[in-house]
Image (cartoon, rainbow, N blue to C red):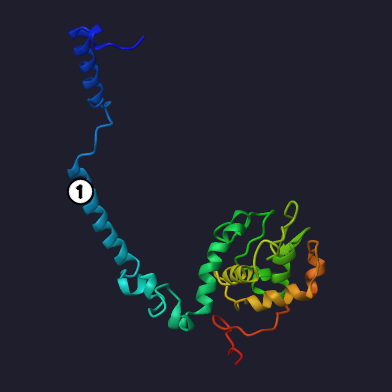
Amino acid sequence: MSANPSNYSPDSIDLDRLHAAVKREKQDLQPGREPVPMLVIFLAMVVAVIAGGQLGLMTGEWNFETSNPFLAASSPDPRPGAGEGAASVDPFQTAMKKGASGYAVCGGCHQGNGMGIPGQFPPLAGSEWVVGGTERLIRVVQHGLVGAITVKGQSYNTPGGMQAFGAAMSATDLANVLTYIRNSWGNEATMITKEMVEKVRTEEKRVQQWTEAELAPFADKNVPGDIPAGPGATKPAA
């Protein structure tokens, strides 16, 4: 049956118009979902601008010349230790700083103060194993250590022994950590370089943990190589 307007009463037509008008009205917002006032948005933008300026001051004073990616080829590298000033960075201090971060994997056993735990985990502070021959120390960290050992006249026997870190750490990271422990908590000894660690890795293909007796021949043996900075520094090769 076709629709005929004459079939609609005035009341029904007015009701349809009323419903259409209601649908066009905006729904009431639920409490807590009202639009953010423009004043609040403006104040937030002002705070963001001020905070960004302060952050720039604390990170070396941001400026368009050094931070614009389109000018990177002609602008100096803004990163610390990069560009022409990189050559002047003290390699010993760099190793100490990075080694302090890497030491986190050792601190759980040897403690943050390097004193270890009596009877279980030997101290690193004042340890002849740490400040002695570099070759023995590299071999210990590279492949681990098992069984009883004597440190500063005291016997220690870590359950399961000391784990090997050679596979988990790069030569650079391992060298930094060893340099750090050789020069912390009153220790003072030559730094260990990446080249020294790589030399031991190349020559030693061992897979199992060491014992104290097996490491005895390396107790006072140092891996040859130039020491670029720090205690006992030598003149780097040309």
Number of numbered discs: 1
Q: Quadrant of residue 229?
A: bottom right
- Looking at the rendered structure, the secondary structure element under dot 1 is helix
Residue at figure coordinates x 27%, y 57% from the top left: 51
Residue 212, image x, y percentages = 78, 65
Q: Quadrant of the N terminus?
A: top left
Left or right of 180 on screen, residue 5: left
Residue 28, image x, y percentages = 24, 24
Q: Quadrant of the C terminus?
A: bottom right
Residue 145 in sight? yes
Residue at figure coordinates x 78%, y 61% from the top left: 209
Left or right of 199 on screen, residue 83: left
40 or 137: nearer the viewer: 40
Residue 27, image x, y percentages = 26, 25
In the image, residue 197 sits, relative to residue 52, either above or below, namely below
Question: The disc labelled 1 sits on which kind of residue?
Answer: Leu
In the image, residue 116 sits, relative to residue 87, either above or below, namely above
Left or right of 56 on screen, residue 73: right
108 or 17: nearer the viewer: 17
Residue 108, image x, y percentages = 60, 54
Residue 185 in sight? no
**Residue that mark 1 sits on:** 43
Which residue is situated farthest in the bottom direction here? Answer: 238
User: How many neighbours does mark 1 have within 10 angstroms: few (below 14), some (14-19), or many (20 or more)?
Assistant: few
222 or 174: nearer the viewer: 174
Q: Quadrant of residue 135?
A: bottom right
Residue at figure coordinates x 24%, y 36% from the top left: 35
